Image: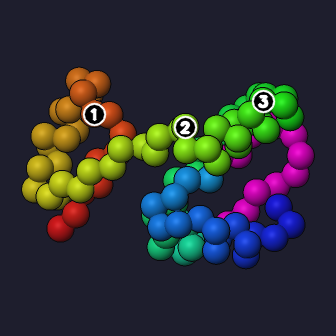
Amino acid sequence: MKNRWALRSTVARGGKIVVSGLMGGNFSLPMVQWIYKRMTIEGFMVGTLAEAQELMGLARSGKIKPTPMKEEPMGDVQKWIDELRAGKVVGRIVLKN
């Protein structure tokens, strides 16, 4: 990635970076920035350039909905582990003190 500073400034807190394809270089981001901004990084192993362009078009048009996120108290950790194991969690659960 030629300009990772631009990437960090364009991804909002809680935003998502999607990396598509196996070939084409390296992707790096300082751990502090990734954690501080609560970014999600997802990757896809295959896909054509046309598919990547289509995916970006869908994202820009707002047709791809963000991953649901919910904050829950740390004291409920066992409840959420049980829910995860049962396949009942949609999105992400963030546990906080």
Residue 11 in the magenta stretch? The answer is no
Give the residue at mark 2. 63
Of callouts 3 and 1, the N-terminal one: 3
Task: Tell me the number on the disc at residue 64.
Answer: none
Depth check, front residue: 14 or 44: 14
- Dot 1 amino acid type: Val
Which residue is pictured at 11% across the width and 50% down the height? Answer: 76
Q: Are the residues tagged 3 and 1 within 8 Å (C-beta)?
A: no
The residue wearing badge 3 is: 51
Q: CA distance from mark 2 to mark 1?
A: 22 Å
Q: Is residue 96 at all visible to an observer of this figure?
A: yes
Nearest to N terminus: mark 2 or mark 3: 3
Q: Which element type, helix, strand or loop, lies under badge 2?
A: loop
- The image quadrant that residue 67 belongs to is top left
Please say if 77 is above or below 20. below
Looking at the rendering, the stretch of residues picked out in magenta corresponds to 18-29
Earlier residue among tags 2 and 1:
2
Could you tell me the amino acid type at mark 3? Glu
Residue count near mark 2 (Cα–Cα under 10 Å), binned few <14, some 14–19, many ≥20? few
Q: CA distance from mark 2 to mark 3?
A: 15 Å
